[in-house]
Image (spheres, rainbow, N blue to C red):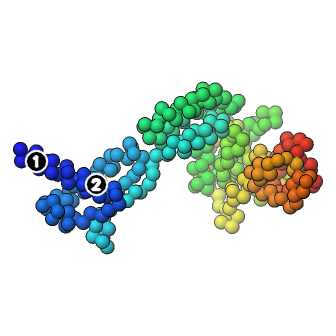
Amino acid sequence: MDNEFEKNGKMERILSMYTTLMNGGALYKAQEAVKYGVSPRSIQRDIDEIRNFLSLNVENTGVVNTVEYDRAKDSYQLVQASQMKFTNSEILAICKILLDSRAFTKKEMDSMLQRLVDCCARPENHQLVRELIQNEQFYYVQPQHNTVFVDTMWSIGEAIQNCHYIEIEYRKMKGQEVVRRKLKPVSIIFSEFYFYMAAFIDDEDEVREHFDVINDAFPTIYRIDRINSLKILKEQFYIPYKDRFEEGEFRKRVQFMYGGKLRRVKFRYKGDSIEAVKDRLPTAEVIHHDEDGYVVTAEVFGKGIDMWLRSQGEMVEVLDI
């Protein structure tokens, strides 16, 4: 009977202390010991049990809570370290973006979505999220290349991180010719259904002689799914910090991943949504606006911009290119 009473008293004590912590209050070990008529060591064991419960409860709540000791105040307080699980809206948005990317094979996409929901959404929300994406997932159309390339992409990422040269066999778009290249990989970029590698061709490679800009300061673009084979070499390269590849700046100026010379274009946009133009061309600046539309200038790389301008039809009038 005494053991049961003691057990109930301990449970009540722990629940009371847990409630105090969850409400943002602080626990003072000496005060709690006096309050419940137990030793400070018993209070410490109670706090450790609360810590253990919070640790085990992460999977269900998605929230990492810890009880930490504040030496200055000689007290224990609850600290929310991080939010581990996504909200319903966040996980739905991520799944939709992943599906709309159409970057992976059907089998890969199904597997990724399954694990994404299982690991990142709270258990009670799993079924709801799956129902919201099931139609789009069922009718998902995989890319025509039908290639599993994520391991190759990871190897490229490791080479970039460690500044290792790589050697690839690459299947070119025109004529399906397979070429061998020794490269300095500097970035992985996603755009319009595909992942790309940005890399500098080795200085000694004769292929540079055929470039539009022989000493081009910007990298060549390779579609990762078109890499037939990849070898990471032991040889390393060095790029000074001042000359490092600025992926964000490059990405703002390239359209459809067509590299080339840096250009400035000027055109009149006659459509209704200038915001759509600015989203497509992050460097776009509106220099004039009247009843005939918006006069826009933008700094871009290569010939990809020509494709976009033509695709706009009568909504765009090219003024300078």
Seen as rendered, the residue at the extreme front is: 291
Q: Which residue is mark 1?
A: 5
The correct choice, above or below, for 63 with respect to 70 in the image is: above
Closest to the observer, 19 or 300: 19
User: Residue at the spot x=88%, y=60% of the render?
Assistant: 288
Q: SS at mark 1?
A: helix
- Label 2 sits on what residue type? Tyr
Q: Is residue 62 visible?
A: yes
User: Residue at the spot x=75%, y=40% of the render?
Assistant: 179
Q: Is residue 262 visible?
A: no
Q: In x, y percent, where is residue 267? A: 89, 53
Relative to residue 226, is residue 115 drawn left or right? left
User: Residue at the spot x=65%, y=48% of the render?
Assistant: 188
Q: Are marks 2 and 1 in contact (CB under 8 Å)?
A: no
- Label 1 sits on what residue type? Phe
Q: Crowdedness of circle 1 by 10 Å Cα count: few (<14), some, many (20+)?
A: few
Seen as rendered, the residue at the extreme top is: 138
